[in-house]
Amino acid sequence: MMTNFYKVAGHTFGVNIPDGDPLCKQLSQYEPFTCADGRQPIFTLSLADTLEEEEETLVYSGAEQTGEPIVKLFSTPKGWISEVAICPGRPISARLFMEKDFSSGKLKIIRRSEDLFSLNNALMLLFAFRTSGMSTLEMHASVIVNGGRAFLWLATSGTGKSTHSSLWLKNVPGSRLLNDDNPIVRVMEDGHVEVFGSPWSGKTPCYKNEHYPAGAFTRIRRADHNAISKLNNFEAYALIYSSSSGFKFDPKMGDDLHSTFEKVVGAVPCFVLDCLPDADAARVSSGTLLKMYE
């Protein structure tokens, strides 16, 4: 068994997969993030045939949404267990044991036909939980880069994030897609906010090991017109909170995340865009957001 190391948003983690396992040939999305130096990884994930049986207490069960994965989280005397299914009504794909501090994990894949889904979900959970105290947020957003800055579109699934990114790509010169579902946002030591690509990008294969200063966070809201307005600090905090991964009900993790939310809101402007799925929506949003940095 060999350990592969990857670096995402400046954080290195390791993945142990047995030689010859079918997963070894499915990791192309991780290749841009390969790291030769595996010293001091923040966590290591290993595939396991079995997990130790422990008393489990359910602490979180995600709301069922059409087409979205179902995740459950249990506490145990030795750590945490998560179960994931690819969508409502489907059998459990995998179970993941995580140490109390999320420094390591063991993944038992139950449905081998969903092994890459299981690995991605396990790594995203470990990354989000482990980095919650490192001024780092794993976000649910689509990201466009323009003018050397990253602009993030935030909304619930199916309400227009990817659509608005595509409108910028078609109608706003100089636009590029950085990530279409799970970018990483990190508050750097000097206080500025940086946006990183990641190996996780939802249904759109966009795995770029690049990073740019955050230009703005914008909530996409369907409407019968196109208009953009700036959010106040309270509204901006609620937007970042609702769009970030992490177990916010855990006291330590919640406090760490709240501290990062406050730093992000204090450093980056946040907006709401009421819009139609048309070219004029891109004109309205880009006219305001890019103008801030002219």
Image (cartoon, grey):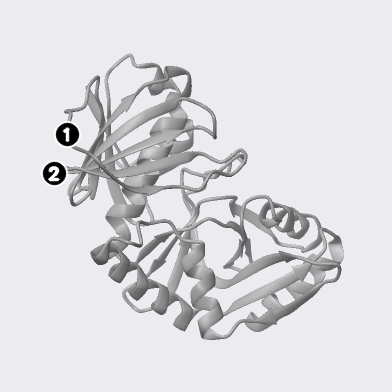
Residue 197 numbered tag: none
Residue to which mark 1 is pinned = 54
In the shown orientation, is residue 147 left or right of residue 74?
right
Mark 1 neighbour class, 10 Å CA radius: few under 14, some 14 to 19, many 20 or more = few
The amino acid type found where label 2 is placed reads: Pro
Q: Are marks 2 and 1 in contact (CB under 8 Å)?
A: yes
Q: Is residue 209 visible?
A: yes
Question: Compared with residue 258, is residue 53 higher up or lower down, i.e. above or below?
Answer: above
* Residue 242 drawn at (x, y percent): 50, 64
Name the quadrant of the C terminus: bottom right
Q: Is residue 207 above or below residue 47?
A: below
131 sits left or right of 275 in the view = left
**Where does residue 78 sit, x and y in percent of width and height?**
13, 42
On screen, residue 173 versus residue 153, left or right, reads right
Residue in view at x 16 percent, y 28 percent: 52
Image quarter where the N terminus lies is top left
- The front one of 40 and 250 is 250
Q: Secondary structure at mark 1?
A: loop
Q: Is residue 211 left or right of residue 188?
A: right
Q: Residue at x 22, y 47 (%)?
A: 41
Residue 38 in sight in this render: no
Mark 2 closeness class: few <14, some 14–19, many ≥20 residues within 10 Å: few
Residue 77 numbered mark, or none: 2
Which residue type does callout 1 highlight?
Glu
